[in-house]
Image (cartoon, helix red, strand yellow):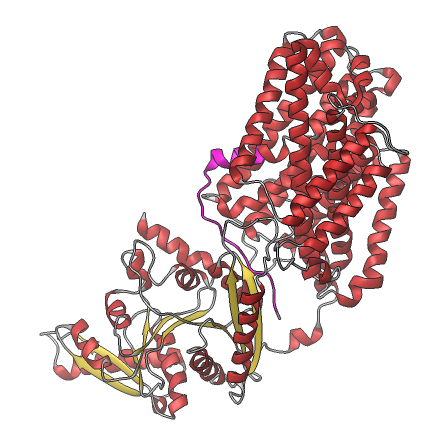
Amino acid sequence: MSSPGETELAKELGVFSALAIGTGTMIGAGIFVLPATAVGVAGPAASLAFVVAGVIALLTALSISELGTAMPKAGGGYYYINDALGPLFGSIAGWGNWLGLAFATAFYMLGFGDYASIYLTIPEFLFLDGSQIAALLAGMLFIGINYYGAKETGRAQILIVVILLFVLLIFTAVGLSNVELDNLRPFFPEDKGGATTVLPAAGLIFVTYLGFAEINTVAEEMKNPGRNLPIAVIGSLVFVIFLYALVMSVVVGIDGPATVEGFEEQAVARLGEIILGGTGLALLTFGGLLATASSANASILASSRINFAMGRDKIITDWINQIHPRFFTPYRSIVITGAIILVFIVWGSVENLAKAGSILHLIVYGLLNIALIVYRETEYPGYDPDFKVPLYPFVPAFGAILSFALIFAMAPIEIILSAIFVVFGGIWYLLYAKKHADGVGLVGEAIAPNGDDAETEQAYRVVVPISNPDTQQRLLRLAAASAQTHTEVDIPELVAVNVIEVPQQTSLEQKLHFEEERIQRQQDLLESAREAAEGLNVSLRTRAIIGRNSGRVLLSVIEEENADMVIMGWKAIKLRREVVFGTTVDLVLRDAPCDVALVHLEKDHIGNPVALAGGGPHAPTAARMAGDFATIENVLPVLLNVQSPNPEDEADNVIERGLHQIGVVADKAGLGESQYEAEVRVSSDIERTILEEVAKYETVCVGVSERGTLSQMMLGTIAKRIAQLGDRNVVLVRSRIDSPKSIRQAIIERLT
């Protein structure tokens, strides 16, 4: 079994950077291409339509912010719908997201062609006009760029956003002085249908706001995402809504609705020419070309992420996600998506493609809001978002209702087409996804829970990250010994995991970048793990994962597997600031919601294991681990307790106190009196005595501490010295925690 891993990026983005990213995802092609079409539907009220569409987008953006801070996942909105509502709705959402992006990309490319034709005279060919030919050529160029793996850098994207904002602000600032209020009257023209045209226009231009969902993908890069993510979502959306409404008022106010409609898709550039002459035409044309190109490229990149998530969940065949052996891009996905885009460019018009893109995403966003309600109401295990939607359940409920209502406010033919698409998603589920997809979603589990799962207790499960073939056999043997002591359940299960870490410099749009040589080494490693597990009387599964951050990947696996314990190997100790063992081990030690054992192997055998049986919260788990490992050598573990002498106590009382502490620890560890040997020492130098005593044993088990600095919380003074012993097997243990946030919160409280 293999699955995609979680990623964690460096938390370097403050609130202002997040606002810039949020704004940049929405400043795109729509405002340059759609004004004339929107004015044709609603007249001057088109500016209100942009506000209405933005407010509906804001409701869904709040929902996706909560989901993003709870479970950042590849696939975004599609993932949450499939997970919460099941593969039927996952099929509808996956296809909706994918084809919606294809429609939107074709729309962007046609807009690009219209702007290119301002300065380029392209002759007609067959049934294609010049702007369509330009759109096709540009589309093939961007498909080729994505196929070969070139991508925008972060700095280039920021530069694009700055340029587009500059262009729009110049146009708006100069245009305001040229606005005639009479051109905005009547605001609701009767000949177009009055105020009733606002919702159809909002449905048409909803495609303009599609980028807001991408804000969710940078949640892990933000400092304090629980606070900054919703600020970025709300702040950027409010800013863009205000900007779009202002731009539309200027567009209509300069020379009236008739002029705008006459300029068609080139309206913004042509109006720039009216107020700024040739310079204005060149400036706004450049802005339009840049916006359409950037939006199209981002959409093609996003489509591969949707394909990956659908293939992972077996909604479609994973064949489509094959990585090119040379360019390391999902080339099949790009080629298929590109072919669909080119067909849409030939077949569609700007208006039809914009409506199609809007409708499909409105279906997805409506389902996304419902998914949030399902997560909340089913009390999904581990669902603990840093940010929660205000005024729940009204916000997601209205988000779902208004998203669907916007579809029904459009023309009957468009409603019929959306219904046909939903039927297509259902048919696809029945003919393909139902046979291949795993799971039924939270709704399906609530309606028809699996009786067998309810009655059968999960086997004791240990996750074992492996990376070193020289130590993996011993590591698996220790994991098996620990698991086999839990005889109250079926044969215990080991899950051997190997993670190939993808550097941050690679594209964020595709989670998996395969390198054949590394993949083969990974498979060989897991195969040798399977061979090493033979005869251990445990069930072994292997998971080969490629992810960004090994620590986050392992945490994801631990949570997915509902693991009882994770046993990790480690080599050396790093004491640099807050890094104790290395970022991967530290992260698992801090956040894993299960018992954690860090094993430093220096010897080939366990020998007589000893555990420190003091008063620490993790001592019982350390004692239990020593007992588990002792079964390998068929010996009894030693529970060691060192007492400081007290002049007021008799020596026997000190020994009794030590034996009592050992008894308490052993009882909590589930060790009977005949299952361990007790050793009590009395010394005024406790640390030195402990080090001298544990030096007599081949394997030492010790619980981590939770006092002092972060390094001391992870180790503690005594544990740190023991861990640095160079000729012993050292096992550092941290007991199960109720929530990953509990220990994190404790650390924060102590540091502050």
Residue at the left extreme, as displayed:
647
Among the 4 quarters of the image, the one containing residue 202 = top right
516 horizontally vs 9: left or right? right
| Residue under the image location 45 percent in, 46 percent down | 11
Answer left or right for 147 relative to 711: right
Q: Position of residue 89 (x, y in %)?
A: 76, 54
In-front residue for pair 535/47: 535
Q: Position of residue 473 (x, y in %)?
A: 46, 81
Name above or below for residue 304 compared with residue 159: below
Residue at 57 percent across and 30 percent down: it is 161
Q: Quick one: quadrant of the N terminus?
A: bottom right
**Position in image of residue 344 (x %, y %):** 82, 40
User: Picture coordinates of residue 614 (x, y %)?
Assistant: 27, 74
| Depth order, front residue of 559/210 | 210
- The reply to whether residue 718 is in sight is yes
Magenta extent: 2-23
- Does residue 181 sit above or below 554 in this rendering? above
Tell me, yes or no, whether the highlighted magenta stretch contains residue 380: no
